[in-house]
Image (spheres, grey):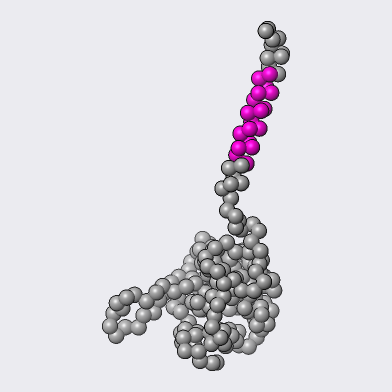
């Protein structure tokens, strides 16, 4: 059957549109299937502390605290002193440490930070909770309005948990920096720090303030 040039052009245009729609639909299906079920765009805040694996997608909010990105953290630190608390986990003690030498882990973090490894756990023992509350009280000199920043690494629940604990303890100026050490070092230098000895000792033996 003979088709006029105009009819043939319309037929080809319609076919092209159909193919484009099919490709778009397939692409959308693939993208939807590839998206993780726990996508970070809608991770809800748990009612209490997070007790699962500390590495994973976190909420975008922390009730009672302020979430800060890099520029907001810079502005906060420029405005006055803040207590910076890193809750990154420490490397394990080597199996055969040098005889007569104390094992002191070291890592790089935001300068002037206090490193409290393990303080971001959602399952701290009662003695550890007492030790943590005492250490925070000392670091803030008892001022519950003092600016505090909690952080660790990206996609880390530890700093979120500590921020939640501080809010529950009555601290009114808590900031959570979810970009963590890696976010900081993209823009600034880091500094080598050691674990806080007072926290480490009290958490280990359950001593009070």
Q: State which quadrant residue 158 falls in.
A: bottom right
Position of 151 relative to 40 (above/below):
below
Characterize the magenta stretch by its predominant secondary structure: helix
- What are the residue bounds of the magenta stretch? 11-28
* Image coords of residue 174 (percent x, y): 65, 75
Q: Nearer the viewer, residue 60 or 184?
A: 60
Q: State which quadrant residue 59 falls in.
A: bottom right
- Identity of the residue drawn at 69% across and 23% down: 14
* Image coords of residue 97 (percent x, y): 31, 78
Q: Quadrant of the N terminus?
A: top right
Q: Nearer the viewer, residue 88 or 147?
A: 88
Q: Is residue 41 visible?
A: yes
* Image coords of residue 12 (percent x, y): 66, 20
- Identity of the residue drawn at 58% across and 50% down: 35
Query: How many marks on residues?
Result: 0
Q: State which quadrant residue 7 falls in.
A: top right
The magenta stretch spans residue 23 = yes
Q: Nearer the viewer, residue 59 or 100?
A: 59
Q: Nearer the viewer, residue 189 or 206?
A: 206
* Image coords of residue 11 (percent x, y): 68, 18
Q: Quadrant of the C terminus?
A: bottom right
């Amino acid at each position: 059957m003979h088709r006029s040039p105009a009819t043939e052009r319309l037929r080809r245009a319609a076919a092209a549109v159909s193919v484009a729609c099919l490709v778009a639909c397939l692409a959308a299906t693939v993208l939807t299937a590839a998206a993780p079920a726990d996508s970070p765009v809608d991770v809800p805040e748990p009612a209490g502390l997070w007790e699962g694996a500390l590495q994973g997608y976190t909420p975008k909010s922390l009730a009672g605290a302020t979430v800060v990105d890099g520029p907001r953290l810079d502005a906060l630190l420029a405005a006055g002193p803040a207590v910076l608390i890193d809750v990154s986990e420490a490397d394990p003690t080597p199996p055969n440490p040098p005889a007569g030498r104390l094992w002191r882990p070291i890592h790089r973090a935001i300068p002037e930070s206090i490193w409290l490894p393990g303080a971001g756990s959602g399952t701290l023992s009662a003695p550890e909770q007492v030790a943590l509350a005492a250490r925070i009280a000392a670091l803030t000199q008892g001022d519950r309005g003092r600016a505090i920043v909690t952080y660790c690494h990206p996609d880390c629940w530890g700093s979120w948990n500590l921020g939640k604990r501080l809010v529950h303890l009555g601290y009114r100026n808590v900031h959570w920096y979810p970009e963590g050490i890696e976010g900081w070092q993209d823009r600034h230098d880091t500094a080598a720090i050691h674990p806080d000895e007072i926290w480490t000792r009290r958490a280990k033996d359950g001593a009070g303030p």
